[in-house]
Image (tube, rainbow, N blue to C red):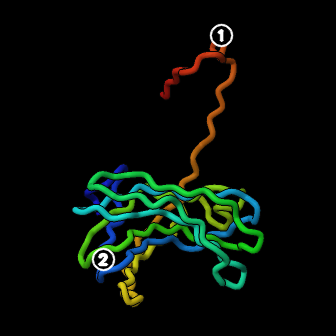
Amino acid sequence: MTTPVNTGPGALSVTAVAAGNAYAYSDLFPVVPGQTYTVDAVVRAASTVRSSFVRLRWFNAAGAEVTTSTGTASNNTTSFAARTVTAVAPASAATVRAEVQFSSAALGEVHYVDNVSLVGGSAAWAGMSDGQTVNWRVQARDGAGLWSTWSEPVPMTRRVKPTVTISNLGAGAAYDSSPRSSGR
């Protein structure tokens, strides 16, 4: 969707095709056991208050789910709100999937997901180069446990952010609690 968005050119629209929980999740990413990973997302309900949260779903090398690390569930409003969870990759984990859940969605409800990031561990983006794209798909589950069909894939592209080193600050500047910077 191009509107509403939190930042950038678009957001993922999640429409409940049945009453129940609605999900959006990423492809699997390789992980290093014992390292810390964080998933962040910004979510918004279109017209009603529903609970939402993010989680890290861990899988072993055979593809079986090992465990899930779930963030705190909070009610949505019609404004964008941040959701996050941080966890250490279990010893048996080989991959992780970032997931956003909207709980108890009513048929036809629309929610939005924006600014999703999965960071951590030296291998969090192993195998993905700058500019490479992976896809998110959405599916809803009704109260009877039946799943909807999959949505069309929505792309997410990796962008490497540059590291900036500031040196030679001058006398006293290192103690300034709010240093100024200027980009040209």
Is disc 2 placed on a helix, strand or loop? loop
Residue 160 percent across, percent down from the top left: 58, 51
Q: Residue at x 34, y 52 (%)?
A: 80
| Earlier sequence position, callout 1 versus callout 2 | 2
Residue 9 percent across, percent down from the top left: 34, 55
7 vs 155, nearest the viewer: 7
Q: How many marks?
A: 2
Residue type at tag 1: Gly
Q: Which residue is mark 1?
A: 172
Q: Residue at x 40, y 80 (%)?
A: 139
56 vs 125, nearest the viewer: 56
Tag of residue 70: none
104 vs 132, nearest the viewer: 104
Tag of residue 16: 2
Which quadrant of the view contains residue 89?
Answer: bottom right
Residue 91 percent across, percent down from the top left: 77, 69
How far, Cα to Cα, is label 1 from label 2?
56 Å
Residue 153 lies, with reference to residue 178, above or below; the image says: below
Residue 110 lies, with reference to residue 40, above or below; the image says: below
Residue type at tag 2: Ala
